[in-house]
Image: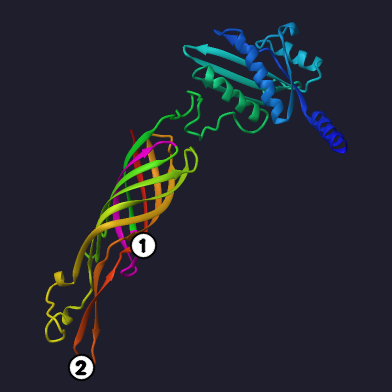
Amino acid sequence: MKKFLLSVLVLAVALFAAEKVYLAPVGLTGMHGDYAVASSKLMKAYIEDDGRYILVVGSAEDGVTADNQAAVRQKATEKGCSKYIIAEFTRLGENVIMSFKLYSVDKDAPIWDDRLKARNPDDFDPIIQRVARNIGTKHKAVDDTDIYSVTEQETKTPKRKGVNSYIGMSVGGLMAFQPEFDVYAGLDFYLMYDAQVILFGIDWDIYGLGDDSKLGYMDIAISAYYPFGTKAITPFLGGGLAYSHTEYQSDIPLEYRSTNYNYSFYDNDEEFEDGSSGLTGFIGGGVMFNRSSRVMFIAQAKYMINFYKNDVFDYEKMDDGRVQITSKDHAVQGFVFNVGIGYGF
């Protein structure tokens, strides 16, 4: 019994705290009258579910229309409402422009308004849900940064609903931890397929550009990333595999490459360079910028490791003055950073 009384009390307080808002009969142009009745019922259900307002739905008996603001305001005042809503739906071809305006009874200008485009009647429900959730707040019904919204205003940046592909290039570097710490500049050419809930990529990477670079790295990679949302600025995480080729030039001083100093004969650079190929794995993520436009920018960071090894040579001066040259296998690994640009098609 106490729980029931408490629930009644909470409900009474909520009803008392919520403002009464009058919804004028929905104005229709080029549409059947049933849409006005159905939309008014949806508005009432969704707005009262939100709990901020109690919606008083107008009817034909009220004798007011959406195009007569003064009469609507007077009717709202008569019904004890502090605010009123004027909604108008206009059909243009196959689309319907849905306009919503919230007024305070003591002001002529709307305190909240939005205009959305429905592609078909299936869009009415999500539009009205969003209007009910955001009306009277500082937010619009549809987030303009959401590039996969089911509705859109044609006067704003067009949004995409389907999959898209990008071709692009980025510049960056490989910060190797093995076989030794160093940073190697490189380029990445990529093709990315954006399927909304997942990103697929094919990359051709080259690192170790420059005549003085000891490491040469090249691969063909495939990757998959999970995007966090569908905003114009979207972070993502994932990983992939690559088939790569790595060449490493060990740094052995020239004076230690003759039989006078070494147990073995080394007289040219090729003796201290090892090339190997195999699989490389990587994990990481990044951020896509301007995902909603034809030109997209991207920043990425990932950790890569070769599943194969390269011979790395080292030298040690012995007590008798000679130099011992040895080799050891190392799997090249480290962080890769790059920033780039892509063109959508």
Residue at 20% in and 78% down? 253
Q: Is residue 231 left or right of residue 318?
A: right
| Helix, strand or loop for disc 1 | strand
Q: Position of residue 189 (x, y in %)?
A: 29, 46
Magenta span: 174-196
Nearer the observer, 200 or 155: 200
Q: Quadrant of the N terminus?
A: top right
Q: Position of residue 243 (x, y in %)?
A: 26, 53
Amino acid type at mark 1 = Gly
Residue at 27% in and 65% down? 309
- Residue 324 vertical placement versus 91 (above, below): below
Amino acid type at mark 2 = Asp
Q: Position of residue 92 (x, y in %)?
A: 49, 12
Residue at 38% in and 45% down? 224
Is residue 252 visible from the viewing direction of this image? yes
**Mark sitting earlier along the chain (1/2):** 2
* Prevailing secondary structure class for the magenta stretch in the rendered image: strand
Q: Is residue 111 left or right of residue 230?
A: right
Residue for badge 1 = 334
- Looking at the image, the residue that sits furthest to the front is 1
Residue at 15% in and 72% down? 271
Q: Is residue 59 magenta?
A: no
On residue 320, which mark appears? 2
Q: Quadrant of the C terminus?
A: top left
| Helix, strand or loop for disc 2 | loop
Q: How many marks?
A: 2
Is residue 109 visible from the viewing direction of this image? no
- Residue 311 vertical placement versus 111 (above, below): below
On residue 219, which mark appears? none
Q: Gap between marks 1 and 2, in whole Å? A: 38 Å
- Looking at the image, the residue that sits furthest to the bottom is 320
- Residue 137 vertical placement versus 341 (above, below): above
